Structures are given as C-alpha cells and as structure tokens.
Amino acid sequence: MNFRMTNEAEFNLAYEKSISNRDDFWDEIATYYHWQNKWHTVEKCSMKDASFRWFEGGKTNICFNAVDRHLKENGNRIAYIFEPNNPDESATTITYNKLHEEVCKYANLLKHFNVQKGDRVCIYLPMIPELVYAVLACARIGAVHSVVFAGFSAQSLAARIQDCGAKVIITADGSFRGLKSVSLKSIADEALVNCPSIKHSLVTRRTNEPIQLGNRDVEIESLLEEMGNTCDITWMDAEDPLFILYTSGSTGKPKGMLHTTGGYMVYTGYTFKNVFAYEDGDTYWCTADIGWITGHSYIVYGPLLNGATSVLFEGIPTYPDPGRFWEVIDKHKVTQFYTAPTAIRSLAKESLEYVSKHDLSSLKVIGSVGEPINEEAWQWYNDNVGKNNCPIVDTWWQTETGGILISPLPNITELIPTYATKPLPGIEPALIDEHKKEINELAASGNLCIKRAWPSIARTIYGDHQRYIDTYFTAYPGYYFTGDGALRDKNGNYRITGRVDDVIIVSGHNLGTAPIEDAINEHPFVAESAIVGFPHDIKGNALYGFVTLKTDKKMDETLIRNEINKYISEAIGPIAKLDKIQFTSGLPKTRSGKIMRRILRKIAEGDFSNFGDISTLLNPEIVEEIKNSRV
C-alpha cells in the first residue's frame, strides 16, 4: 500500500482497508517512520471511557523523525524559508542541518535549566524560527510543550501556565505585527506574578526593545552559543505526552488538550503528505500561527516528518499592502498554499491588481482551514489565486482531532464548493438526529460525530479526564461528538454547517462565550451579559454582546463600550473583542433563569421571523424591547 495516494482507485482501496482491517492499515502506515522498538498492539480504544492507546510498546521520538532522519541524505535541503514581517528584511533559509543544530542547542539549554522528561514548558513566542526550535527541543528531550498564541493577554497566559504547571517559559522581548510591535516580555511578566511553578523565564531577542530583567529572567542569546550543537534523543513510549494545547470551552476554563507521541506522529505525517500532495522539490506555505493546532500539525510536525520545505511567515496579510501573500508566493515559488477563509474574504475585498501583478503559476494545491468557507470566497479563491487550475482542499478538523479528518484529496476527490467532501482513511463520520439516533440515509443533516478512534485523537483534557468524557463522549454514547453540525449529500460528501454549542468561530479562532461574558461582568457597571455570534463578511462570524447595566442613570455608552472591550482584551486578548454591543434592560430567560441565546442569536442576525413560543419566558416582553433597539 502506498503512503501517498495518487488516484481514486488507491484512495478507495486505502479507505476500505482502513475501515475493514484498520490494525493492518495503520501498522503499514506507521512503518514509514523510525521506531527504536516496534509496537506490540496497534490500537486499544474505547469510546465509552475515552481511553485511546495506539502503537503500545513502541518507542520513538518525533523530533528524530522530523529532523535527524533526514540528515544523512537531505541535510542540506531547506526546511524553512523564514519570511520576516518587514519585507525589507531579507528572507533567510534554514537547512535540515541548521535546524538540527539549533534544536540541539535549545534542547541543551532546557537541560541546563533542569528540564526533564515529562516537565511542561510554556512557549510564548512570535512566528520566528526560535519558536520551531523550542517546540522541537521539548520533543527531543521528552518535555511537554504548551505553546500559547502570542496574541493572548497576560491573564490568558497565566491561566494556561497555572493549569499545566509549567516549569519554564520561553518568550521574547517583543513581536512585530505590521507597523506595530508588541511587548511580549511585559505581558509575560504580568502573567508570571501569579505563576509560582515557573522557575525560569528564558528570553530571546526579536524587537531589541528595552526590557526589565527579574530574578527568574535569563537572556539566552549568549548562553545558546555555549550550548553544544548535538543532543542525545530521549526515546519515548508511543503514549508518552507530546504537547498540551489549550482550546476555548463553553465554560470559562480553557481545555488543555493532551496529545501523545506515536499516534499523533503517524497521523499528521500521513495526512500532510496526502492532503497537500507534497512531493520533493515543492515549497509549502501554511499562513497559520504555531500557537494554534494548524501550526503544530501543518507548519511544524507534518511537513518536517515528510522532509518538506516550508515558508515560515512572521507578518500579516495586509502589510505593507494587501498583496503580501501573493508577493511571497511569487517570490518563493510556493506550490501548496494553506490559509483561512477570513484571510481570503478580507483580501477578496481589495483591488484585484494586488493579485494579478504577481505570478502564481507555481501553485499546485490551495487550501482552507479554521472554519467553513462560503461559496463566494471559494469561487474568488479558485478564480483568482488557483486560476481554475488548482484543487482547493477545504479541510475540516479540530484541536481535539490532532489532524485533518475530512478533506478533498488533490486530483482525486471531486471538488464541491463549501463541502469538505470525503473522510480520510481511518475516519468514520456519522450524523446523529435529535433523538440521538444515527441517520442511515446518505442525504441528511445532523450533529457530526465520529464512530471510531483514529491515531491522533486527543487522549484527555490535561488534569481532568472526566471533563473530557463529559464534553465529547456523553451527548452521544459510543461516539466522539465534534460540536459541529453537518450536511451529507447523496454521494457521501460532508458540508460543515457550524458550531452547535457555545463556541463561536471568529476569524478561524474558537472563542467560548463564557470567558468573554466573565470578562464583561467584571466591569463595575455591568449586571449581566450574553454573547452570540452573527454573520460577518470578513470574519465569518463576529461577536454581538447584549449587556445589562446596573443603573438606569444616563451614562456615556460609547465610553462603556470601549471599556468593555478593554476588559475583554486584557482578560483574553484583542481577538475576542465585540463588534457590536447593545445595552438592554434585561435578557430573555426561562423561568429557571437560563438565558435564551437562541432568541438573541436571531436578533443579532436581524432575523425576526420566528422566535417560537416566548410566552413561557420569565420576561417575554423583553424580546420586543431588544428587537426594537438592535444596533
């Protein structure tokens, strides 16, 4: 069986084998990688108690497979082309040999500060090569990395450090974003006031702005030069933890999804190769941030496991102008391009001259990730970027899944705009109806679940396995519940219709409503609040806040709106700020006190057609009042 499928017959054969004889299927795929000891059991999984074990008895190391394995034959191959924020700053190339040296230095640095196998290391860095070095260094020595997106606030950073009990943080003086720079060190300092588990804060230089050094702080540039450029591999059991990555939950506390070594390695490497049809000599570019799962799986691990050459991009799509993406594709002759619908929609509103003046003929595959892509954006992407000549892989997956589960395969799957199309080998989707029964008809809609485990499924929520079971495995016993709704056509193609829980996808970021409401409710004038999503031309969804104030006195509403968004920005980060804030005298509630978000969602969307029976509400009159004062 081929590791990479190249035609429909090979795909059908692989999918059929992955379902009917999945142990043999994954056994064959796993042999593509280096294992110090082979496994004795391919998989032992139970949806009932959310217990998943893959390749038990096997010993490997994902850093060895991503870096060292390529050195003998391809050490001089380029692993990354680093494209800085400022286009006037030259791009730099990092070969696999260079990557190996830098990762070893970082690994030795961590050992110097007594980081050992199983210790958690928080990484709070911008999109610079040092972020990749730090991630792989942790994997090399068996430390568990927890990358926190560098746009998160001090409060969000602290919550993640506290939850995982990180021993060391790696951060930078600052980061560049377009014309702005952000002082990451000062944000980290604020977070660490409440993080006693952190013994050392290791600081690298990027912006060269002045920083304050405290007792725990170490500037690492000169220290790294003293570190050896070789470091022994720590061989890991297949089920040893690899990383913890936090995702928003419907409660205030973020969920630390724990991924382990062997299964995650096997699945991300396999899906990268097939979804992007990567071949030696290609140049791949994913525009995501490594602070999200897309960056973990398809900037770091997936590409490197396949010896790929990738663009590592520090900047933003609109700096110095909205042609930056297309200029970079032209400059580096990118062959596979993977970005978010939000970015596509944003750039589609700009003059086509920004696209047309660049040569995009190198592109072979273009992709979409983070949220469902609407048809208008899909067609613009196809016409103007792919030139009607590039398959669009509209990928569906989650932080919890570790890798892509549903996606077209280039030049194999029939493309249907807005459809993620077919499940990949090993993935068995199911649609569940309102009676909690699986729908057997092909053409149907329902809640999207997965029937059986796959190698890269998250193993638990760090420190709270019961929450993991309750969140994903109790709504529909025997299935993994994705939290998404989906349509399925008569040919078995899937279209994701969006979240069905209290998580809203804004610009591809999962934002739980509860922590945003908690932040708003800290404002001294706020009595209560409710957040819903509403359609947005660029972001896909934006946030609409219904806020009840504590007093009837006339106040400066603009000032309070600004203050509310400041509270949100400080508690979570600027990504969670509200686009619209409506002040209300109350919120529609059931007699048990539950806020009827369904009604608020319809009002936010401007859909007043059918609120259903509101007579049973505690305060039915409030619905008309809120409707009439919609902003």
Image (spheres, rainbow, N blue to C red):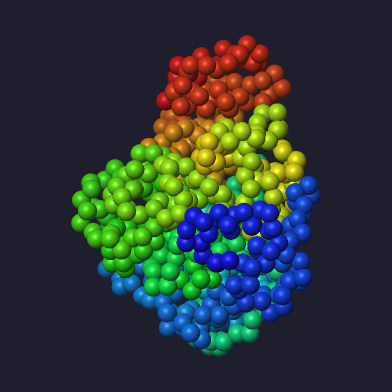
Question: Which quadrant of the view contains residue 193?
Answer: bottom right
Residue 497 left/right relative to 265: left
Above or below, comparing residue 554 to residue 62 in the picture: above
**Residue 207: x percent and y percent?**
40, 68
List the single residue furthest toward the right.
Answer: 49
User: How many numbered markers are drawn?
Assistant: 0
Q: Quadrant of the C terminus?
A: top left
Residue at screen point 51% across, 65% down = 4
Location of residue 486 (image quadrant): top right
| Front-lying residue, 262 or 500 | 262
- Residue at 52 percent across and 36 percent down: it is 489
List the single residue furthest toward the front: 9
Residue 26: percent from left, percent from top: 65, 63
Could you say where residue 216 lies in the image, as x and y percent from the top left?
A: 60, 71
Instruction: Judge whether 25 appears above or below 593 on screen.
Output: below
State the quadrant of the N terminus: bottom right
Residue at the location (69% across, 58% down)?
21
Viewer can see residue 423: yes
Residue at image coords 46%, 27%:
605
In this image, 290 relative to 261: left or right? left
Q: Nearer the viewer, residue 612 or 217?
A: 612
- Nearer to the camera, 130 or 521: 130
Q: Position of residue 610 (x, y in %)?
A: 52, 16
Residue 162 appearing in the image? no
